[in-house]
Each structure stands twice: as C-alpha cells, then as structure tokens.
Amino acid sequence: MTWIMEFKSLGRVRKMKRFKIYALLVLAIIGFFNPVRASADVGPKPSVTIVVKGGNPENEVYITLLSKTSRYGPYSAKESYENEISKKFSEFKDEDGYFYIDNHYKLKDGKMHWSYYPPNDFKVLMYVPATDSYIVSETPLKTFAFKTFYNVSIPFEISNANGNTIIVNPVRSYNIGQEALGISLRMLLTIAVELAVALLFGFKYRKQLKTIALTNVFTQGLLNVLLFAVLYFLGGLLFVLAYIVLEIVVFVIEAFIYMAKLKTADEKPVGTFTVWFYSFMANTLSLIVGIILTGYIPGMF
C-alpha cells in the first residue's frame, strides 16, 4: 500500500515539474512579445545587397535606395533633415520620381545590405562628399526572392567629376547556393528547436522524434516555397503579413499531423491538448530563435 502511495506521489511531482516547464515557456513568450519588443520583425527578412566595384577607393561613399513612394514600411520622406548626408540625398531630384525615404548607409567593403523593409521597387543612389557627386541607377530595379543582389560598377572618373551625376546600370545577380544554404539552415534550426521542446514535453521515444522531424521537413519546405512566391509576386510589404498567416497555417497542419501520428510508447494517441499546446509552443519558440538570430546574421536568415 505504501509503495502505491509513493508511486502516486511521484506521478504528481512529475506532473508538477512538467506544469512548471510549460509555465516558464509561456512566460518566456509573453516576456519576448511585451511592448518593448513590439516593433520586432518576424521570420526570414527580405533584403537587398548592393555590391559596388570601381571608383576611387580613397573617397567615402554613401548609398541608399530610392523608393517610388514617399513612404515604405517604417521609412518615409521628410520635409527637412539635420544630417548632412540625408540632406544631400533628399535634394536629389530623380527624373522618374523616386524619393529618398530617410535611410542610408556608408559603403563598407564595397557593400550595402538593406535588411529591413527594402523598397520593392527602387533605384540605387550614391553620394560622394569629396566630389559632391551623385551616382544613380538609370532604370528602376526590383527585389527578387528572399535576398536580392545587384552589382554596380563605378568609373574611376567619379573622383574628378565634381558636382556631376553619373548614371550606372546595376546588374542583378542571384546566389542560388547561398539561398539554398539559408533555407537549409532555417529548416535545421526549426527542427532542432522543436525537438528540444519535444523533450521538455516528454516526447523522448525515437518514433515520436522522427515524426516531429519529418513533419517539420514537410511544413518548413512548404512555408519557404509559399513565402518565396509571396515575395516574388506580391512584394515585401505583404511579406510579414503572409509570414504570420502561413505560420498559423503551419501550426495547425502540424497539430493535426501530430494528433494522427504522434503515439506513446504503447502506440496510444497523445492527448489532444498536449499536441496542440506542444505545436503552439514549438512553433513560437522556433520563431523567437529565428528573430534573435536574424539580428546577428541578417544575410542568412
């Protein structure tokens, strides 16, 4: 009789420990999405990378993307600027009506990486303070896939072209290998996080972990294909909204698959609440990890 009581007591302790783990996960998510972090972007971010070659290496060069509209995402044109470089960019009058939207970079190592809300339709504009000269792309350009790359060649004569505007023709390049690597890393990251959460939920058997891994291979592959299509056909403004909607769809699909396929050691179905709660927590935590890593490796995620 005593050992039965001890067994029941041990069961209650395990349930209490598991409840504490669930509670800590929920608190971590609430803490992450508090108002301080409300401005955080989600998911793999569309980006534009401009690679600049040529010109005078001794001159500083500042670079921006002009937008077709005076507002795009969090960026917008202003009536006046205190920053001298911003003033110069805003004073440039593009013949096709593209605007400076208050975001620019100092060219470093011949590259500019715009990783947060790059305009979907844009022109490249550079400014060289030493010669008070502009360099602008002749025709409008567009984003492509998750990461867009353009190469720009600048003639050396820009160093002597005081006050002039030089027209360049950026050439689009696409790094298929890097794109494939990025997708693979995102998929592996998601599977690793969701398996770690699975262990916290007590899913420790090989069949359970295999089911979770294979399910994520399917859902993450589907997610990336659909996001690619959204970005290519609809542009960056709808990307974040589409990502949120598709993440919800992935969460639901995974929950239904787990209800049908996720079995206990004696081949019994896992409880409905446990399956849905696990799917929600695993997807949310993998999303959080992705957001954090995006800040450190913007070109990869």
Image (cartoon, grey):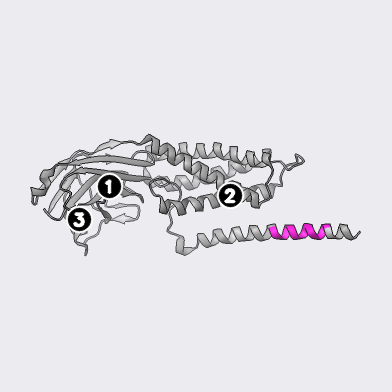
Mark 3 or 2 closer to N-term?
3
Question: Foreground: 143 or 8?
Answer: 8
Q: Which label sits in the foreground, 3 or 1?
A: 1
Q: Is residue 1 visible?
A: yes
Task: State the image quarter where residue 263 is shown.
Answer: top right
For disc 1, the neighbor class at 10 Å (few under 14, some 14 to 19, many from 20) is: some
As measured in the structure, the alpha-carbon distance from the residue carrying label 3 to the one carrying label 2 is 45 Å
Asked if residue 281 lies in the magenta stretch, the reply is no
Task: State the image quarter where residue 259 is shown.
Answer: top right
As measured in the structure, the alpha-carbon distance from the residue carrying label 1 to the one carrying label 2 is 36 Å
Residue that label 2 marks:
282
The magenta segment is: 7-17
Q: Please tell me whether mark 3 sits on a helix, a strand or a loop.
A: helix
Mark 1 or 2 closer to N-term?
1
As measured in the structure, the alpha-carbon distance from the residue carrying label 3 to the one carrying label 1 is 22 Å
Looking at the picture, how far across and down is residue 165, in whole percent?
Answer: 12, 47
Looking at the image, residue 65 lies above or below residue 184? below
Q: Tag on residue 90?
A: 3
Q: Residue at x 28, y 36 (%)?
A: 172
Amino acid type assigned to the residue bearing label 1 in the image: Lys
Amino acid type assigned to the residue bearing label 3 in the image: Ser
Q: Please tell me whether mark 1 sits on a helix, a strand or a loop.
A: strand
Q: Is residue 26 left or right of residue 205?
A: left
Residue that label 1 marks:
111
Quadrant of the image containing the N terminus? bottom right
Amino acid type assigned to the residue bearing label 2 in the image: Ala
Looking at the picture, how far across and down is residue 62, in whole percent?
Answer: 22, 53
Looking at the image, residue 18 lies above or below residue 299? below
Magenta span dominant secondary structure: helix
Q: Marks 2 and 3: in contact by CB < 8 Å?
A: no
Looking at the picture, how far across and down is residue 90, in whole percent?
Answer: 20, 55
Q: Is residue 216 left or right of residue 134?
A: right
